[in-house]
Amino acid sequence: MAEILVTGGSGLVGASLRKFLPDAVYLSSKDGDLTREQDAAAIFDEHQPRAIIHLAARVGGIMANIAEPVKFLNDNILLNTHVLENCRRLGVERVIALLSTCVYPDEAEHYPMSEDDLHSGMPTPTNFGYGYAKRLLAVQMKTYREQYGVSWNYLIPSNLYGENDHFDETAHFVPALIAKIIQAKRAGSDSITLFGDGTPLRQFLYVDDLSRVILHWLGTGVDADVNVATPENFSIREIAEIAVKACDAEGLRINFDASKPNGQFRKDVSIERLIEVMPDFRPTPLAEGIRKTYDEVYDKIADNAG
Ligand code: NAP
């Protein structure tokens, strides 16, 4: 019998959470495909959890979302539905699930956006299926709360990064940037090239900061659905400059390939409600988080670069 079960435990967030919560059971898709009703029921019957941290999701970059929007919509609706319905069936007391700030409206009337803005406009077109599936998870959790009086909440993290990220061709912006800096240092190159024109704004949160918030939600039973982000909202160009400095690569020139897409221009969110619950929440400054990540992954990436 598991006290706490973590779905999607083999990913970036799961690897971070494991450091803080080593005794939970961490699942991956190898333990069962949560888009399949029978697999989900078997997992819950086997573990009989008291609490669930629901991280599993079909996630992907812009190109994958454009190529297969049906998969991103349907898989996420299916796996969220199976997880929540099994939690109801077995009377799981506490559920904490994750949305993402990239499911907020493509354009808002004001920034930073608050939790009340979640449904106020369409998600960015390159995130359409994923965006609506994740928004539906918020709707599902609210309706379960209303009908069954359960203590289930969701958190809405901004873009994340950390040492257990993907640093290959599927990498998100920050891990790809760190990998490019390490490879350039190894090769003795004097420049790196990044996609887009460098103007979009992003809040990048060090993943361990999110883990601390998840633990607080789990431990205290606080009843709130909140954004989890850093107030640092830098342009892509500024982030690249911070990273170059943090990785001791000053002098490395940053070029932009403006023929490649920028993605959503901005999606910054307010963390006022999080701070009401956790007044001492101090997100890791970007320069520090990038340095920690760089130190952890340097050898692996440098070795691969030959
Ligand atoms: P990740 O590294 O891509 O990991 C995804 C996890 O979900 C893996 O453990 C994967 O298992 C599992 N999974 C995927 N499809 C599954 C299925 N059909 N059945 C069972 N398990 C399945 O993701 P992450 O970055 O840790 O993200 C965790 C959560 O945070 C997600 O809900 C995501 O939407 C949210 N989030 C992430 C970010 C970010 O920047 N990374 C930002 C905001 C929100 P395998 O390893 O076996 O494939």
Image (cartoon, rainbow, N blue to C red):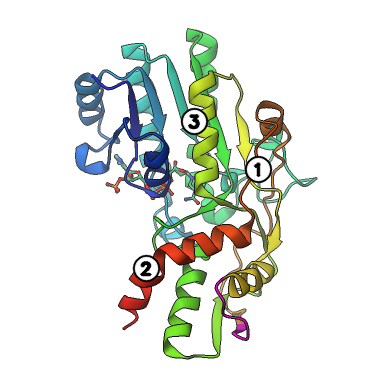
Look at label 2 and name its amino acid: Asp
Which residue: 25% across, 33% down?
36
Badge 2 is on which residue?
A: 168
**Which residue is painted at 50% across and 33% down in the image?**
214
299 in relation to 76, above or below:
below
Is residue 249 magenta-colored? yes
Residue type indicated by callout 1: Arg
Split into quadrants, the picture shows ligand 1 in the one at top left
Instruction: Measuring from the top left, give residue 272's x and y in whole percent.
Output: 73, 35
Q: Earlier in the sequence, mark 2 or mark 1?
A: 2
Instruction: Tell me what residue is drawn at x 32 percent, y 13 percent.
Output: 89
* Residue 233 percent location from the top left of the image: 70, 56
Element type where label 2 sits in the image: loop
Cβ at disc 2 under 8 Å from ligand 1: no
What main secondary structure does the magenta stretch of the protein show? loop
- Label 1, ligand 1: CB separation under 8 Å: no
Tell me the number on the disc at residue 282.
1
In this picture, residue 66 sits left or right of residue 2: right
In the image, taking residue 163 as reference, residue 276 lies left or right, namely right
Figure check: 48 above or below 40: above
Question: Under tag 1, what secondary structure?
Answer: loop
Residue 174 percent location from the top left of the image: 53, 64
**Range drawn in magenta:** 247-254
Residue 266 visible in the picture? yes
Which comes sooner in the sequence, label 2 or label 3?
2
Q: Label 3, label 1: how many angstroms apart (C-alpha)? A: 15 Å
What SS does tag 3 mark? helix
Q: In the rendering, which numbered label is found on residue 215? A: 3
